[in-house]
Image: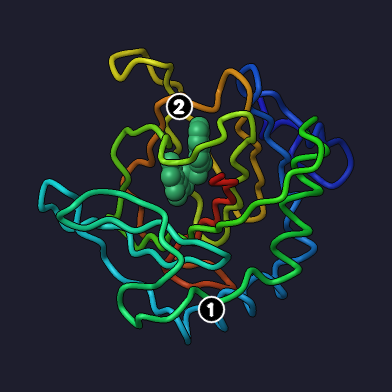
Amino acid sequence: MRDLFDGDVMEPRDVQLAPGAMLLAGFARPLEASLIEAVNAIVERAPFRHLVTPGGHRMSVAMTNCGRVGWVSDHTGYRYDAIDPESSHPWPQMPAVFADLAARAAAKAGFVDFRPDACLINRYKPGAKLSLHQDKDELDFNAPIVSVSLGLPATFLFGGLNRSDKTARYRLTHGDVVAWGGPSRLAYHGVMPLPDGEHPLLGAQRINLTFRKTR
Ligand code: MD3
Ligand code: FE
């Protein structure tokens, strides 16, 4: 359906995927250069790393963070931590271009005054995937999570409140922003293994920014 309208003339750029889940197709595209530059600056100080789950599995997605706190995982569990365990320093500050984009997208999706204090940055190389999970390490589930997709397209899995609920599949492409709040906030979700490809700006990878209000 979306492809039918995905041109320069007719674009229903805002699509409700599910109650509380609003896709703003291409919303981040005008900022692509600034966003990629900001990611590169963050990664210089807090490089991408493959976290290990509490169960001992190395994640195929590489991660880093910016903001007051960052999401980390190790053998002791998952948590938000103000200190990057790799460097023992605070995470890089959230750049204004990130915070502004997240707030504008949230507002457009109907979530007023979204001020994220954490941004988890995921890097997918071909084959990398994210298994079905809920994001529930945050304290305030009234706030949405805002995601920004950059680079190669991915197939996103979106289920219900139970792991066994049927999942819908959505293609998320470069510049797409989604606000996930309300009844969608605690939905199970994941990402299918990234197909090979070459993106003009990012090469053979997909970068996803997820903005969270953790407290
Ligand atoms: C729906 N990231 O970092 S973004 C994650 O593409 C994560 O890297 C995926 O799931 C990625 O936790 C998906 C879309 C997303 C993010 C958070 C959600 C969808 C969500 C939270 C609740 C419901
Ligand atoms: Fe998630």
Q: Is residue 163 above or below residue 57?
A: above
| Residue sitting at the far right | 9
**Ligand 1 neighbours mark 2 (CB distance < 8 Å):** yes
**Ligand 1 neighbours mark 1 (CB distance < 8 Å):** no
The quadrant of the picture occupied by the N terminus is top right
**Going 72% across and 28% down the picture, which residue do you hit?**
15
Which residue was labeled with disc 1?
42
Q: Is residue 100 left or right of residue 60?
A: right
How many labels, in total? Answer: 2
Percent across and percent down for residue 104 are 81, 48
Q: Could you tell me the amino acid type at mark 2? A: Phe
Q: Nearest the camera: 150 or 84? A: 84
Q: Nearest the camera: 80 or 170? A: 80
Which residue was labeled with disc 2?
158
Task: Answer few, some or many: residues within 10 Å of disc 2's Cα (few below 14, many 20 plus, some between 14 and 19).
Answer: many
User: Which badge, 2 or 1, is on the more N-terminal residue?
Assistant: 1
Q: State which quadrant residue 183 falls in.
A: top right
**Going 75% across and 67% down the picture, which residue do you hit?**
97
Percent across and percent down for residue 53 are 20, 51
The quadrant of the picture occupied by the C terminus is top right
**Going 65% across and 52% down the picture, which residue do you hit?**
116
Q: Nearer the viewer, mark 2 or mark 1?
A: 1
**Going 64% across and 17% down the picture, which residue do you hit?**
19
Q: Secondary structure beneath disc 2? A: strand
Task: Answer few, some or many: residues within 10 Å of disc 1's Cα (few below 14, many 20 plus, some between 14 and 19).
Answer: many
